[in-house]
Amino acid sequence: MPSHHLPLLLTAFQHRFRRDLEAMSRHLVDDVAVGWDELGTDLLDGAPPALAAALTGGEDWPSSTLDHLISPDGSPPVRMTVTDKTADEQDMQWGYVLHPQGIEVISLLHKDIGRVVDWNTDPRTVFSDSPAHWASIAPTPLLTPVRAAVPQATPATPPAQGSPARPGARR
């Protein structure tokens, strides 16, 4: 679900992989034989502790792959290409595509194209899990955008007439 996966993937890109999409792609796509069962907090390695705690509530869990699967005939598992048929058979609800500009989120309801979430998006943003919100023509479904900066307090009294408004200001 986007509310779980996007914060982990955004944080991994921004911190663990230091904005290196190739390194992130190798880890998530090339270095696994079959696919992912669960994305874990190890993707948050290198993130500021306060950010990791905000995303996980202080909990830790490992990522796990599907590489341990055994096929019915005993042969090693192979990565499959997801088609409409296999997505339905596997009960897949979401797809995530890594692009240079961000992560495309594709819901099963809108199989052809999804919304792209920019890599610079704050990972603490709360995203919708409603597939209808991820249609390619809809705006990115941020439920609670995170404020980038806290506004500075307004001075209680204006500077006296003829004095500089701030230290070092020219008159």
Image: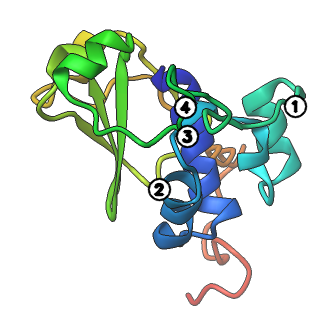
Find residue 21 and name its label. Answer: none
Residue 124 visible, this orientation: yes
- Tell me: residue 115, above or below residue 26: above
Q: Nearer the viewer, residue 22 or 100?
A: 22
Q: Secondary structure at mark 1?
A: loop
Residue 146 visible, this orientation: no
Who comes first in sequence, dot 4 or dot 3?
Answer: 4
Q: Secondary structure at mark 4?
A: helix
The amino acid marked with disc number 1 is: Asp
* 103 lies left or right of 49: left
Q: CA distance from mark 2 to mark 3?
A: 38 Å
* 9 lies left or right of 112: right
The amino acid marked with disc number 2 is: Asn
Q: Percent position (x, y) of residue 168?
A: 70, 88
Q: Which residue is mark 3?
A: 76
Q: Which residue is mark 1?
A: 60
| For the residues bearing labels 1 and 3, Cβ distance under 8 angstroms | no
| For the residues bearing labels 4 and 3, Cβ distance under 8 angstroms | no
Who comes first in sequence, dot 2 or dot 1?
Answer: 1
Q: Secondary structure at mark 2?
A: loop
The amino acid marked with disc number 3 is: Pro
Q: Percent position (x, y) of residue 51?
A: 77, 43
